[in-house]
Amino acid sequence: MAFNSFLKRIDLARLIIAAFFVFLCITAVALRLNLAELITSSLSRIGMWSVLVLAMLPAIVSGIGPNFGVSLGIICGLLGGLTALELAYRLDEIVQFSPGILFLMAILFSLPFALLVGVGYGWLLNRVKGSEMMIATYVGFSIVSIMKLAWVFLPFTNPEMAWPIGRGVRVQVALGNRGLAQLLNNFLAIRIGEVVIPTGLLLSGALCALLVWFFMRSQTGMAMAAAGSNPRFAQAAGISVDRQRIIGTVLSTVLGAVGILIYSQSYGFLQLYEGPMFMPFVAVAAILIGGASVSKANITHVVVGTILFLGIQVVAVPVANAFTADWSSMGEISRKIIQNGVILYALTQAGGE
Amino acid sequence: MGAAPILRMRGISKSFHGTQVLHDVNLEIMPGEIHGIVGENGAGKSTLMNILFGMDVIHSTGGYEGSLEIAGKPVDIKSPLQAMEHGIGMVHQEFMLLPSYSVAENIKLNREVLKPNLVSRLFGSGLQSLDYERMYRDARRALGRLNVGIDEFAPIAGLPVGYMQFTEIARELDKENLRILVFDEPTAVLGESEAAHLLKAIQEIAAEGIAVLFITHRLSEIMEVCHNITVLRDGRVVATRKKNETNVLELAELMVGRSMQFNTNSKRQVQRGKPILEVKDFKVDMPGEQVRSVDLTVYQGEILGIGGLAGQGKIGIANGIMGLFPASGEVKINGEPLELNNSQAAIAAGLAFVSEDRRGVGLLLDASIELNIASGAMFGHGKFLKTWGPFSQTDRRAIRENALKYIKQLGVRCTGPTQKVRQLSGGNQQKVCIARALTMNPKILLVSEPTRGIDVGAKQVVLDLLRELNEELGMTIVVTSSELAELRSICSRIAIITDGQVAGILRPDDSDVNFGLLMAGQPIEKGA
Amino acid sequence: MQSKTTVLRESFVPRSIESIKQFLVSNMVTIMFVILSVLGYKVSGMTPFLFFMDITARISRNAFLVLALIIPVMAGMGLNFSIVLGAMAAQAVVIFVTHWGIGGLPGIVLAVALVTPLAALLGFLTGTLFNRTKGQEMIAGLILGYFAQGVYELIFLQLVGSLIPMSNPRLIMGSGVGVRTTIDLTGGLKYGLDWPGQYWGNDLLLRPTLPWTALGLSVLLALVLLAYQLRAEKRKRWSIPRMVASMVGIVVIAAWSIVQIRSNSQINWIRVPLLTWLVIGAACVGLHFFSKTKLGQDMRSVGQNRHVAAVAGIDVNRVRIKAIILSMVMAAWGHIIFLQNLGTFSTYGSHEQVGLYSAAALLIGGATVAKASIKHAVLGTILFHTLFIVAPAAGRQLFGDAQIGEYFRVFVAYGVIGITLAMHAWKHVLQSRSDAKPSGTEH
């Protein structure tokens, strides 16, 4: 009995994944892989994704479930980034923005988009209660695919972003030219032997998490959690459930926008077109691996999930490659299986109607 | 009538998790007899029917004692399918119809007439074709027996409610071996003329030799159609009467009868304060508990009880005042009109509500005790917060202190203020609900079904608590309960709700007959 | 007398306007796409020959897959995005049949025989999963597709050649591990079912041209319709305007065919893969038959209300699993038809969009998440693939960039699914809200 309840709490699926991660780490050590490099790239990958995974939290807490449509927020972030770059280019004659200012400008410009889109998206999700996950997925897909048209037609003139010939924005917009690439990663970066700790990146992730944590303890945050976990209770307590769900959606969208900018500076490019399409699934899988369910989540789930899932992704590839060169696709394949397996598992646990 | 009963239930007893809900029930029905079963909520009617139907709830909880005989042969019904095979049919309280199917397809649902074809001979009987012609013919025949002119081709969606009810009955009649037909509150959803037609149809069905079990709250209907009547109370048969040997008054008294030892609150004479809550022409659209037009006045410092049978609307009143279901009409608190359909306004006006649905509405089951106790005041009145301009943070210490105070005061048995509410027993959960309401420091406390689903000892504690609150703090309390005995033990006045209206307001020491009559929708006769 | 006629007119006129309005509203999506297709075709500047050749091929290639989606909709499980698994099963089988070097119609027959049990097994597993995610079948199906993609890649990219022995330089990568990323079926299964061949050149009698086929089909359709109208009971017959409209449509197609046949147009060179079309026709007839069987009725019962169906004694979970098995097997067959017509396929990509494009086609034909028929599937296949053909050309004509047209058609696929899903969910929410109110009469 006691053992059963212990198993229930630990959750077999997560145990397997954690064991797999430990196994990978041990194998990596045993195979004498370059640990410093592995740790360095794990840290930066974890930092890159941290805020995008964090974006799942307000969505789940407010009751709309894991935000499969966080690609909307991602697109808002990309728009903010492009706007900042465009502005910098147009004002080149007058002022030169430092990379730090430019980065803040990108975030600032993405906020109005994210707020607006978040409200509209939240409004839609309030109308489709019970099918949020599917609708969110397809809203995300639709918006990403219509934005492919938009990237072609938007009136950006900055030559760093445009195709040399033809029209539209490039598939990947380099951030290196204006010093944005690796901006946060290099900020206060600490080098211990060959391991580089991207302090700025991790700090910014932690800062966002802290803000969300404070928010969750505020009156609105508490009301949002109540609305998400028991809408009828919330209604009886005088809380507008629909409003709280919109707030959760907006927050998730905003975090998505900020998250992609943090991600992009580390990656060095803004990835447009197909780029945002499947990013939500990674973030969803990460928070679920951390122990969240489609209706319950907290900051710990975000932290644990990000470390586990993205850690596995970084370590799996060189470990697989070390066995045989023919297994080069193993990293990607294991990601697909784990990512979608975990989401499926969470769906069955939700128990349906 | 034949000499042998078609159905005989002997010595039926049943208990759920140690609580006995049926004690030695005996029932006999002849072919062609219409047998009425009356009783309050929880008298054991539905458990009895579940046993007759072999429902899973019975067998998954250890079965029952006693014996069932159908046409003289002992039977053991293990599943609804077996019940059907024995010729037992049931017209459910809720509609079991598929809207886009025609009346005929619904009547033949999962009993479709089939004809084999080439494919079905090769690949199995699942691929046999539907024989629509014969399905329509059967449907027409079944409807004909009810004397209703329903088009068997018409889709169910869009039909009047009465037609849906007749379709359900026709489905049972269409079952060839039907010998016993159970009606569970068949007239609850019908208008008057439809109900009259239905009663006539029931008599015709019985005239064909089918035994009918008729369950209803409406005593007048019972008196109109039944040959014999069994009254259940607290799981026992208190009486079986022939129709011409009884009357509505007697049935009402038998139904309510004092089942529990209690002290009425009559000793404490009510000093009527000023009206604190006035409700006029109040309507609430709560599914299953429609309030049609209620006028009520609650006086400062009293405990007002709201009673009545399930489905009559008593539950809807408090829910409507709190803005949880669409309401219209006029509600005044201390003479000030209250904005309806706005929970926030109701809370701001000084109301606090302990819901009848404790686990669904009353609590955040996975949150701590302390948070649950504080939540009402935090969301409703902005308490327990430290604010800096637009930013706020919860005041953990204040929340803890408040919780500790109430845990001690109300005697909540728990491991500590951070324990999750889900892990508490029903009685302790109820105490948390009350603590939550008290933390809001209400002018009026609305409590619905305070003792539902909690064990006997805890019941008394909760009731005593309500009385103490009233006597010592002078708090005005409105208690809604299905347990008449409870209301009579703590209230100063009891309003009985029937058919969404106040049937009358009685004193706790009024006679059983009067309570029974009001609950059964009969006017109290002068001098009765 | 006079008053009676005015009453008649009053009641008649608004009703017909009302019914036209209702027709337009309920067929909004389809009508929009008809207009879009016609405009796209005009703008694209394609020759009729190229267009009709392409659309003929695409209908034979995709129609069966779209039909595979109908049964789960009947059973109330929405759009079955898990048909991707059926497509993967088909590809797996096609890889092996190609490996064994069996081509032509025998190869197709063998592939169908092998894929059927495999797809049925996958269908059983998927159905079991769906029974544990009731109400979320669509998202579960979508994610399951991604999950299965990982497993499929694991098997064919990593295990074949290393754990599963297979050596065939045509199929296996140079390193000896993993199946090549593109597989050429030429000389094997290519056109195995598309008998008697799709393209011009041979003047055998059994090589029907597109106009002759269209003429034949329209005559057949007209006869079937007339027979129905004469034999069916009065209340089931089509209304006069509906009948007239359908007949006009049929006559237009027939007239177009005759004009083509009598002219020298290149369109007479387009041949129809008759056997494939017969198979698709058989699937339509089979589905129609199925919907009138006991199992079909059970599926519709379960689809409308699981609780009521269960109370009536229907084994809901079993019926749902059967629906998914049938859908999965049909999808696998459909994907074999797709692959043999395509001739070359991408081992790790050809199945990916099967769910998306089939679902979009079905919805464009006028289906919803809760209602889909053969008519929707056929019409939707034609409309969606018309758009697919003309969009890149139209994009090039309008913006000088075919890519834009391509982006547009992908957006259309996602957008139409997104909008339909949202509308359905919205309706569902509104409905359950009004269901909550008992329709009891006021006393």
Image: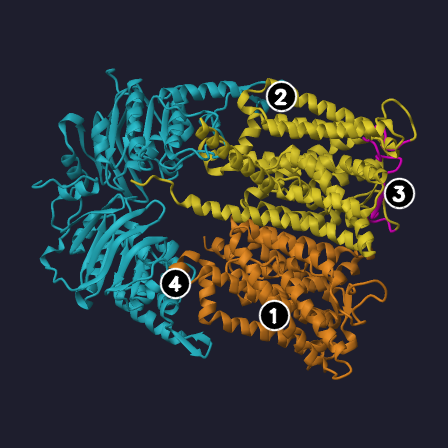
- Could you give the CA–CA distance between mark 1 and mark 2, rounded to whole angstroms? 60 Å
Residues at marks 1 and 4, common chain?
A: yes
Q: Which residue is mark 3?
A: C170
Q: Chain A, which colour?
A: orange
Which amino acid lies under the numbered mark 4 shown in the image of this protein? Gly
Q: Which residue is mark 2?
A: C228
Mark 1 vs mark 2, foreground winner is 2
Residue closest to the eye, B5 or C214 = C214
> Comparing marks 4 and 3, which lies closer to the viewer?
4
| Identity of the residue drawn at 68% across and 27% down | C247
Task: Label the yellow chain with its letter.
Answer: C
The C terminus of chain B - image quarter: top left
Give x and y (percent) for residue A28: 73, 64
C-alpha span from label 4 to label 2: 60 Å
Report which residue position mark 1 lands on: A112
Residue under the image location 41 percent in, 45 percent down:
C436
Mark 2 neighbour class, 10 Å CA radius: few under 14, some 14 to 19, many 20 or more: some
Q: Secondary structure at mark 4?
A: loop
- Alpha carbon of mark 1 to alpha carbon of mark 4: how far? 29 Å
Q: Pick the residue in front: C9 or C386.
A: C9
Residue that numbered label 4 is attached to: A238
Q: Earlier in the sequence, mark 1 or mark 4?
A: 1
